[in-house]
Amino acid sequence: ESPSDPAADPPPPGVRSLQARFLSVFWLLRMADWLQGPYFYEVYASKLIGGAPVSLDLVSKLFLIGFGTTGLLGPSVGRLVDSKGRRAGTLAFCLLYTAGALSVRSNLLWLLVLGRLAGGI
């Protein structure tokens, strides 16, 4: 008797339903994150901080803060979500993402930086 190919075995009952629920939320969050990019540049570039318009250099640094946070903390956050559960991780992501999105309403540099840090996590 040869071992069966695991890919050929039908998935256990309920797997398709779980995949549909998970993937719908996953892609909704991914698309929200993807759609924000072009708009955040305009938002940051329109800011006045300390009475001066925000430079392209500062806008670039704000973007890098978010991407750098993701790169540095991503593996640790992934392990934390694995230990605490996907539901808790998804809810935490939504809260941090919301805080990051709301921070763009501010003209305070420290709050913009905190928002990018929160969005990067």
Image: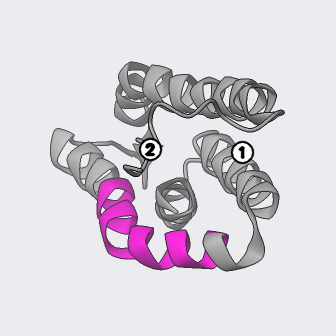
Q: What is the span of residues highlighted in magenta in the rendered image? A: 65-81
Q: CA distance from mark 2 to mark 1?
A: 46 Å
Q: Is residue 59 above or below residue 14?
A: below
Q: Left of 40 or right of it: where is 19? A: right
Magenta stretch: dominant secondary structure: helix
Q: Nearer the viewer, residue 120 or 10?
A: 10
Q: Position of residue 94 (x, y in %)?
A: 73, 47
| Secondary element type, mark 1 | helix
* Residue depicted at 28% across the width and 44% down the height: 59
N-terminal of the two: label 2 or label 1?
2
* Residue depicted at 82% across the width and 33% down the height: 13
- In the orientation shown, which residue stands out farthest toward the front? 1
Is 79 a magenta residue?
A: yes
* Residue depicted at 24% across the width and 55% down the height: 61
Is 80 a magenta residue?
A: yes
Q: Which residue is mark 2?
A: 4
Q: Which residue is mark 1?
A: 98
